[in-house]
Amino acid sequence: MALPPSGTTDEAFVREVDEEYRREQMLGIWRRYGRLIVGGVVVALLALAGFLFWQHHRESNAGVQGEQFDLALQKAEGAPDQAATELAKIAKEGGDTGYAAIAKLAEGGLLLQKNNARGAAAKFAEVANDKGLAQPFRDLGLIRQTAAEFDTLQPQVVIDRLKDLINPNSPWLGTAGELVASAYLKAGKKTEAGKLYGEIAKSEKVPELLRQRAVQLAGVLGVDAIDQSKETKAQ
């Protein structure tokens, strides 16, 4: 991706991902806690996806794909079908480049706009299962796949699928952790959910907004995470 990080490209991508996640919120991951949980997932994934895009944009040498990707995103709102066709081409020809992965993630986002959660999950799964891609892209694909499929999955499937992404040293603790915690709640395991929200609240690796949300949800479940969060912030 030879193009330098440009305001136009970054803003276009961030705007597209933001729209994708806002629409994904409407799917309602879980009726009672879904809105709060999805809000945290959205913020963290948006920030991480933007960083991954910038990093690969700077370090790789795929200028043509970069231009094509930028143009496709510009068409996403007004001509989503055309954008999807162009994104599919980038995904097919990109090999193991960052643009190929991001194009598939964007394809999945467009499918979510059409309320095609199954199709979107399949796109995200392609990224998650592609061993030729960098691990951060695969992890992001797995999280988005799980979010898209959440309503159709048994809680234990969500827990088992994301368990490697919720350890204290994982950069995905906040996003994957909220999905796992919601699975615990769905399974009636309030103690486990409260404990996990507490871990999210005290982690310095989790964005402040997610930590604040975790404090609130932990409190609802009887876990006092306020002191933990303040102590971590003061360190």
Image (cartoon, rainbow, N blue to C red):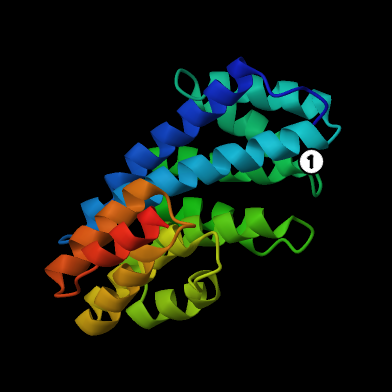
Image point (26%, 54%), residue name: 213
Compared to residue 187, the image places residue 55 above or below, namely: above
Residue 201 vertical placement versus 66 (above, below): below
The C terminus appears in which quarter of the rendering?
A: bottom left
Q: Residue furthest right?
A: 61
What residue do we see at 17% from left, 60% from top? 31
One can see residue 37 in this view: no
- The N terminus lies in quadrant: top right
Q: Position of residue 169 (x, y in %)?
A: 55, 68
Q: Relative to residue 94, is residue 111 drawn left or right? A: left
Which of 166/75 is in front?
166
79 to the left or right of 72: left
Of 6 and 198, which appears nearest the observer? 198
**Above or below for 5 versus 92:** above
Q: Position of residue 97 (x, y in %)?
A: 78, 44
In the picture, residue 88 is in which quadrant?
Answer: top right
Q: Amino acid at mark 1?
A: Gly
Q: Residue at x 64, y 34 (%)?
A: 87
Q: Residue furthest front?
A: 235
Residue 100 seen: yes
Q: Height in image: 200 above or below 20?
A: below
Residue at 30 percent across and 66 percent down: it is 228
Which residue is identified by label 1? Answer: 94
Secondary element under disc 1, as helix, strand or loop, is: loop
Q: Position of residue 109 (x, y in %)?
A: 48, 41
Q: Is residue 221 left or right of residue 42?
A: left
